[in-house]
Image (cartoon, rainbow, N blue to C red):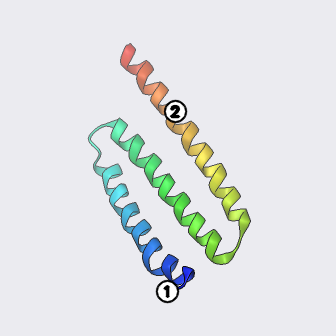
């Protein structure tokens, strides 16, 4: 089994299944904190998919896109957590 077959037949299906399960948690999440965590995990899974396609098609620009998306996801998670903490104090 080559690397490309491994990526196509094992890694991508696992990422898609996990994205579906995470999306279900995002929709059914009882609290806003659950939704924030699931959205962050969904973006992280998307970054994994972008990384796999970057390896398959040998495009390093996709890795730059994944890095920017990771930075935006991290900053948005921190900002929303800060907002929730401030809202709880009032």
Q: Is 76 or 13 nearer to us in this picture?
A: 13
Q: Is 89 or 7 nearer to us in this picture?
A: 7
Please tell me which residue is depicted at 55% across the width and 79% down the height of the picture.
3
Residue located farthest toward the top when viewing the structure as drawn? 90
Please tell me which residue is depicted at 52% across the width and 33% down the height of the picture.
78
- In the image, residue 81 lies at what x, y percent? 45, 30
- In the image, residue 32 lies at what x, y percent? 35, 37
Evaluate if marks 1 and 2 touch, with contact meaning CB atoms under 8 Å apart.
no
The part of the image, by quadrant, that contains residue 9 is bottom left
Residue located farthest toward the front when viewing the structure as drawn? 1
Q: On residue 74, which mark appears?
A: none
Count residues near mark 1 (Cα–Cα under 10 Å), then give few for <14, some for 14-19, many for 20+.
few
Please tell me which residue is depicted at 35% across the width and 50% down the height of the picture.
26
**Whether residue 26 is situated above or below residue 90 in the rendered picture:** below
- In the image, residue 87 lies at what x, y percent? 41, 20
**Whether residue 37 is situated above or below residue 63 in the rendered picture:** above
The part of the image, by quadrant, that contains residue 54 is bottom right
Count residues near mark 2 (Cα–Cα under 10 Å), then give few for <14, some for 14-19, many for 20+.
few
Marked residue nearer the N-terminal end (1 or 2):
1
Where's the C terminus, which quadrant?
top left
Q: CA distance from mark 1 to mark 2?
A: 41 Å
Helix or strand or loop: what does disc 1 sit on?
loop
Please tell me which residue is depicted at 73% across the width and 63% down the height of the picture.
61
Relative side of 42 to 34, left or right: right
**Whether residue 54 is situated above or below residue 21 in the rendered picture:** below
Relative side of 43 to 16, left or right: right
Helix or strand or loop: what does disc 2 sit on?
helix
The part of the image, by quadrant, that contains residue 10 is bottom left
Q: On residue 78, which mark appears?
A: 2
Q: Identify the residue position indicated by label 1 in the image.
A: 1
């Amino acid at each position: 089994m080559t690397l490309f077959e491994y990526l196509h037949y094992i890694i991508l299906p696992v990422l898609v299944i996990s994205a579906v399960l995470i999306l279900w948690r995002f929709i059914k999440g009882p609290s806003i904190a659950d939704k924030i965590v699931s959205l962050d995990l969904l973006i992280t899974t998307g970054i994994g998919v972008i990384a796999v396609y970057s390896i398959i098609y040998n495009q390093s620009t996709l890795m730059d896109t994944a890095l920017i998306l990771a930075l935006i996801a991290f900053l948005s998670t921190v900002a929303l957590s800060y907002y929730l903490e401030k809202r709880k104090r009032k």
